[in-house]
Image (cartoon, helix red, strand yellow):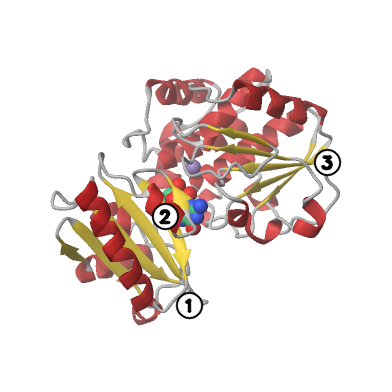
Amino acid sequence: MIVTDPRAWADAEGYLRRAQSILAITHVSPDGDAIGSLLGFTHAMRSLGKLVTPACQDQPHPRFDYLKGVHDIRQSGEGEFDLIVSLDSSDLARLGSVFIPAQHSRLPVVVFDHHITNLNFGLVNVVEPGVSSTSEIIYTLLRRMDVTINPDIANALLTGVITDTLAFRTSNTTPDTLAVAMALMRCGGNLQEVTRQALIMRSFDSLRLLGAGLMNAKVEGRLAYATLPRKLRKELDVKEERGDAGLVGTLITAYEVDVAVVFVELQNGDIEIGLRAQPGFDVSQVALELGGGGHPAAAGCTLPGPMRDAVNRVLPRLKQVIREA
Ligand code: 5GP
Ligand code: MN
């Protein structure tokens, strides 16, 4: 496990030890690492006698229903707290409406994250871009703090490790990642069940949306792109409102492609943009420039609509990334 800033780790531990009531927040549209690190942290700090309120602006996807405590995650940040902990978020805006500036700005914020684009928006920033997942960082934190990792904590953290590494297949998988996964299995984590529920199983609707998106995808040079307009969701009668159904992750598996992008039209007309890159290409900086963030190989941002404007803005910039790599 890489430790970028030993002082930040020590300061974070100090704040956690002294805290009595913690508001733990993860990012909007939460993925497996967001939910996993949030719940793993929550269970662990409660075992140390802290009051912890886990919060996220958006409700977790039902695929995470197997995780203990997932239904206790609140969609509001109201309450009395003495510490805020941010998990898996690279900037304050990504915490969404559960961060209430009028109430929370006077409180210390401790950030745990692994995005290279993190803006260090906390009072203390534990940011480890070399680590697979925020869940892997939280595992290290719990070991430092001598927390006993029970099966609920293990399954939560394993969920983050498995989803952010696509089951140990991505370039952010290190020997440490495997060692952490092994330790979590020994603590009662169920690798096969977590992989099946968090990563493999999906709705038939999302398969149909993926299929339609693939049929409409284009390749220009070594850039693949596709759009998922609301109209398409409506035509297919897809009930799931969010996400790209795995489309960008599928496009980047083509031999012909170095960079892939998918544009998802949201209910409010904004366009959610998912980016992927082959090793040797970096899409994190484009995402950062456009107000988002992420990793060199996987990043994202949200732009105002209409679709055509977002597409015209992003495609030339990605072609430049490919040219200049
Ligand atoms: P995905 O395409 O799986 O939604 O996201 C890929 C990566 O980009 C994840 O690490 C995610 O946290 C990051 N990401 C996606 N959208 C945004 C965004 O709007 N803002 C920020 N800061 N990061 C994003
Ligand atoms: Mn993550």
**Is ligand 1 within 8 Å of the beta carbon of the residue shown at mark 2?**
yes
The residue indicated by pointer 2 is 287
Q: Amino acid at mark 2?
A: Ala
Q: Which residue is mark 3?
A: 82
**Of the residues tagged 2 and 3, which is closer to the observer?**
2
Q: Quadrant of residue 244?
A: bottom left
Q: Where is residue 293 drawn, in percent x and y? A: 46, 51
Left or right: where does residue 206 sit relative to residue 194?
left
Q: Indicate which disc residue 269 carries.
A: 1
Foreground residue among 271 and 178 = 271
Q: Nearer the viewer, mark 2 or mark 1?
A: 2
Q: Label 3 is placed on what type of residue?
A: Asp
Between 315 and 80, the one lying in front of the other is 315
Quadrant including the C terminus:
top left
Q: Which structural element holds mark 3? A: loop
The image quadrant that residue 221 belongs to is bottom left
- In the figure, 178 relative to 92: above or below? above
Q: Position of residue 62 (x, y in %)?
A: 53, 56
Asked if residue 253 shows in the view, the reply is no
Q: Are marks 1 and 3 in contact (CB under 8 Å)?
A: no
Residue 247 visible in the picture:
yes
Q: Is residue 243 above or below residue 182?
A: below
Question: Which badge, 2 or 3, comes first in the chain's sequence?
Answer: 3
